[in-house]
Image (cartoon, rainbow, N blue to C red):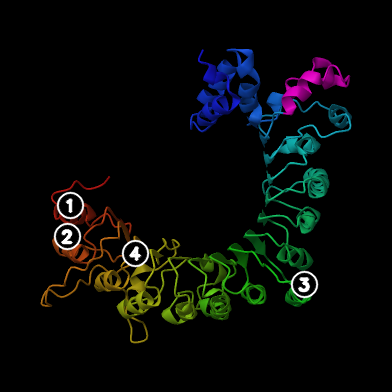
């Protein structure tokens, strides 16, 4: 053996490379074999072998047999503690818990008055079944914890009440012991006490709470004061709007709220959003994912929310997603007219202030009411846009024929004419998704369009197209090529089996030197 391989720095460099192998099983086998080569390699290889456990069962398997029945001694646990000190990351899934016979007093005896996993940094628990009631959460405590993720599922039962209290006690202990905790994710049916445990974790940098309980205004006010919080995801189903306003107003009078926040994803109602967004820091947020609550309401009710949002973040925001999924078909009977559920240019107009937007996604139950002129206006708003998605598959009850029935009060639907406009005004556009009426191609009597220098766009999705028996594949391909001559992928999301969209693809890619159609 070369002497250099006995140097700890070189050996750990090699082990680091093995640790990044995507084939985790192969990496673990390599660590096991290296630990058996010589004494100099044993401890470093074992450190890597035991650093990340997919289940805490592997560690509990080191306990003497009598431990499972209540008998323990310090000497009998020495081997267990020797390996426990190597563990950095722990994951656990309910479906693999063969050691649930460990009694709570035995788990306390394992600790012997100290933390069981002293070097633990990351905990990922997926506890959705009945056995979660017996899972010893106190095994997953450490002063070095940096990240905790707990998913308890959304199935409610009477048995979960005891576990919710145990989870509350565990999170309180984490807040008290783990001063270096930076990331917390909670998901599932969570009690108010569990969610309120977050309020004292002031050093968090990312917080994601996706649960069925309501986030109390006082808890949100505490979270808003976290000085290092950069990434926040939550749902704010707050019925008491005045309480929310008072809580945030009181907290804002003593400290700057959300002072470090850069990424926000939230599901919220318009009244709560107006209050919350008014407290966002100016020129700080870079990414916002706004999920509209599921209640059917006019899209226009969100215009004041978008106005406040744009006012606060117009100088910094680069990534914006609006997710408006509404079950309107269940909310109205056949005799009632639904409210305006289509996005229009007027609805989106407040966003014109966000001049540096690079990614915009509109994910709605219904396609937007946008015509060629509207898209030209949007293109002028965001000259730096790189990804523009204005299409998502509508709900099944959506009436396609009615959408394409133009009246004097409806704007014309977007046509392929918009492609050339977007190509001219958005030179950095790389991905585009657009509802388009392909039955209306630019007139062949017009002078040929100048091929713009838009070679950035590589992916185009055309949705909500009219049933296209009359679509001329060669003419459509020519129109696409004139606007975007460097496409690598074209998708027609229309559900129309009668139109040969493959012919369009073959015509387009045939213009690129006979390049094969991507599959």
Say which residue appears at 79% left-offset and 57% top-offset.
200
Mark 2 element type: helix
Say which residue appears at 56% left-offset and 69% top-offset.
331
Decide which of tag 1 and tag 2 comes sooner along the chain.
Answer: 2
Q: Identify residue for label 2.
A: 473
Image position, residue 316 (x, y; %): 52, 70
Image position, residue 151 (x, y; %): 67, 45
Q: Is residue 423 above or below residue 134?
A: below
Q: Is residue 126 visible?
A: no
* Residue 323 falls left or right of residue 412: right
**Mark 1 vs 2: CB contact within 8 A:** yes
Q: Identify residue for label 3.
A: 251
Decide which of tag 4 and tag 3 comes sooner along the chain.
Answer: 3
Q: Identify residue for label 1.
A: 506
Marks 4/3: CA–CA distance: 41 Å
How packed is label 2: few (under 14 Cα within 10 Å), some, or many (20 or more)?
some
How packed is label 1: few (under 14 Cα within 10 Å), some, or many (20 or more)?
some
- Indicate which label's residue lies in the foreground, 4 or 1: 4
- Point out the image quarter for the C terminus: top left
**Mark 4 vs 2: CB contact within 8 A:** no
């Amino acid at each position: 053996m070369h002497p250099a391989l006995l140097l700890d720095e070189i050996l750990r460099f090699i082990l680091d490379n093995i640790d990044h192998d995507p084939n985790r099983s192969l990496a673990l086998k390599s660590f096991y074999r290296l630990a058996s080569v010589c004494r100099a390699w044993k401890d470093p290889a074992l450190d890597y072998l035991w650093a990340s456990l997919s289940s805490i069962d592997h560690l509990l398997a080191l306990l003497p047999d009598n431990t499972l029945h209540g008998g323990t001694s310090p000497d009998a646990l020495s081997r267990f503690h020797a390996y426990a000190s190597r563990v950095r990351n722990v994951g656990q899934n309910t479906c693999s818990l063969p050691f649930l016979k460990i009694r709570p007093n035995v788990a306390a005896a394992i600790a012997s008055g100290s933390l069981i996993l002293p070097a633990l940094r990351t905990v990922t628990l997926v506890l959705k079944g009945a056995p979660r009631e017996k899972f010893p959460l106190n095994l997953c405590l450490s002063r070095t914890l940096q990240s905790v993720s707990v998913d308890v599922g959304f199935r409610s039962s009477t048995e979960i009440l005891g576990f919710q209290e145990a989870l509350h006690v565990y999170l309180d202990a984490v807040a008290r012991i783990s001063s270096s905790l930076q990331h917390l994710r909670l998901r599932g049916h969570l009690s108010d006490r569990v969610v309120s445990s977050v309020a004292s974790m002031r050093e968090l940098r990312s917080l994601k709470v996706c649960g069925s309980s309501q986030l109390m205004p006082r808890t949100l006010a505490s979270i808003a004061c976290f000085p290092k919080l950069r990434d926040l995801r939550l749902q704010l189903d707050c019925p008491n709007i005045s309480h929310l306003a008072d809580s945030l107003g009181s907290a804002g009078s003593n400290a700057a709220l959300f002072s470090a926040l850069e990424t926000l994803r939230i599901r919220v109602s318009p009244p709560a959003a107006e209050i919350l967004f008014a407290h966002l820091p100016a020129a700080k947020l870079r990414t916002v994912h706004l999920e509209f609550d599921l209640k059917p309401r006019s899209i226009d009710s969100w215009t004041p929310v978008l106005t406040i949002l744009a006012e606060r973040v117009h100088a910094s925001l680069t990534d914006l997603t609006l997710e408006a999924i509404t079950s309107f078909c269940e909310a109205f009977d056949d005799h009632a007219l639904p409210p305006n559920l289509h996005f229009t240019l007027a609805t989106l107009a407040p966003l014109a202030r966000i001049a540096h937007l690079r990614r915009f996604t509109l994910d709605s139950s219904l396609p937007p009411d946008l015509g060629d002129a509207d898209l030209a206006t949007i293109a002028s708003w965001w000259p730096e846009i790189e990804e523009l998605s204005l299409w998502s598959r509508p709900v099944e009850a959506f009436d396609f024929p009615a959408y394409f029935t133009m009246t004097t009060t409806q704007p014309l639907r977007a046509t392929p004419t918009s492609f050339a406009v977007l190509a001219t005004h958005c030179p950095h556009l790389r991905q585009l998704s657009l509802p388009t009426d392909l039955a209306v191609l630019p007139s062949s009597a017009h002078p040929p369009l100048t091929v713009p220098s838009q070679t950035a766009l590589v992916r185009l999705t055309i949705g909500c197209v009219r049933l296209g028996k009359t679509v001329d594949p060669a003419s459509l391909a020519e129109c696409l090529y004139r606007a975007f001559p460097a496409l690598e992928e074209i998708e027609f999301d229309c559900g129309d089996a009668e139109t040969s969209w493959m012919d369009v693809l073959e015509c387009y890619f045939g213009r690129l030197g006979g390049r094969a159609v991507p599959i």
